[in-house]
Amino acid sequence: MSVELDDPTLHTPAADDRGPDLPAVRPGALRWTDFAIFFGASVSSLSLVWLVYERLAPTGGALGFLICWVATFLLVYWIVVREVDGPLVATDKVVAVGIGIVAVGLLVPLISILVYIVYQGLHALTVGFFLHDMTGISPQDSPMAGGAAHAIVGSLEQVGLALLMSVPVGIAAAVYMNEVRGSLTRPVRTFVNAMSGVPSIVAGLFIYAIWLLQFHHSFSGFAAALALSILMLPTVARTAEEVLRLVPDGLREASLALGSPEWRTTWSIVLPTARSGLVTAVILGMARAVGETAPLIMTSFGTQTVNWNPFYGAQQSLPLFVWQQYQLGGGAVGTPGFLRAFTGAFALIMVVLILFVLARLFGRSKFTTR
């Protein structure tokens, strides 16, 4: 049985038979029509929600209106983009817009808090705030009187001592869990995970019961550093372990193949490779502890004068200074204590920002290992 080669049923469809050629559309590309669709979907969904939510439905409230508007906008936006560019592009753009809305929703409260702190803190922010303490200053005095030099010194010393105690132990624990992988790896990891959920007040109570009551030591910045190190240790250890896992195994194998012992491989290859990540672990640990107030009430207690010796006598810190000044002001807006509290919060943000920038610059600096 022969087959006719010119049988039209055996011919592949020509280009003209496949319909018009549609231009390729990249889901991430932005066109003027995308802005028009976004604006139209926003206005139409806002109008629809306003009509139903405010006029027809027996409901009210700004939060519910906002949630309904966002949900309606995403639905309308998906329908319009689907008609224009197809379901694939519509899904991609709706997901992108949804993620953007969530990001804006997270940034708005953060920016609002920062703006409010800066606005209130600037009322009492002077050069003397960083140079003087609260010696002889009463709660009724002007917010310009006194300063937080004693609190800044205390915070730097306490956080510095906590870093010296927690960072070596945390990195050593991470190295043991990821590099050594001994028989106690699972118990150590379980213990570290359990410590990460310890409330800060429990750490303060523990140091108060052991260091102050059992060993009969007085309130001091060192006692506060002990409590802060308990809070920093699990954060540093867990983050450092995750960072060490990202180091390629080929680097370890190459070092071991050249005859280097395991400890030398870890010290000269693994740790330098993960240096920037380890600096990030230290930053996260510092951020976990630098703003804590509860453990400091029972360990450093606070004072109105500068105490340069963290091992003897009560010592102030910025979080404790903010809490005490807010208590003295009674929480009333505009009182001297209220303004000093927000100025202290602003100073705390600036100190943390400076420490973070220095840590990042140190982590990115180049050095050679031998």
Image (cartoon, rainbow, N blue to C red):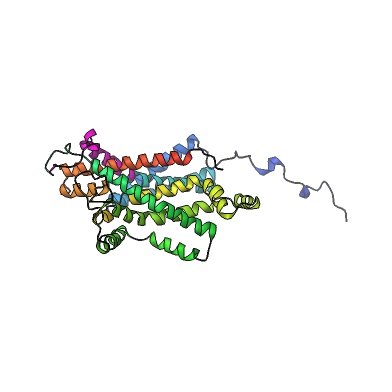
Which residue sits furthest right? Answer: 1
**Left or right: where does residue 313 sit relative to residue 274?**
left
* 111 is within the stretch colored magenta: yes
Residue 259 seen in this snapshot: yes
**Which quarter shows the N terminus?**
bottom right
Measured from the top left, where is residue 317 in percent x and y?
26, 47
Q: Quadrant of residue 211?
A: bottom left
Exactly how many numbered labels are in the figure?
0
**Left or right: where does residue 254 sit relative to residue 287?**
right
**Left or right: where does residue 17 sit relative to residue 99?**
right
Measured from the top left, where is residue 86 in percent x and y?
54, 46
* 313 is within the stretch colored magenta: no
Q: Which secondary structure type mostly characterizes the magenta part of the structure?
A: helix
29, above or below 67, in the image? above
Residue situated in front as seen by the camera: 283 or 152: 152
Residue situated in front as seen by the camera: 135 or 146: 135
Image point (72%, 42%), residue name: 14
Q: Which residues are magenta?
A: 110-138
**Which quarter shows the C terminus?**
top right
Measured from the top left, where is residue 5 in percent x and y?
84, 47
Residue 66 seen in this snapshot: no
Measured from the top left, where is residue 282 in percent x and y?
42, 48
Image point (24%, 61%), residue name: 216
Residue situated in front as seen by the camera: 265 or 366: 265
Image point (61%, 51%), residue name: 260
**Left or right: where does residue 207 sit relative to residue 251?**
left
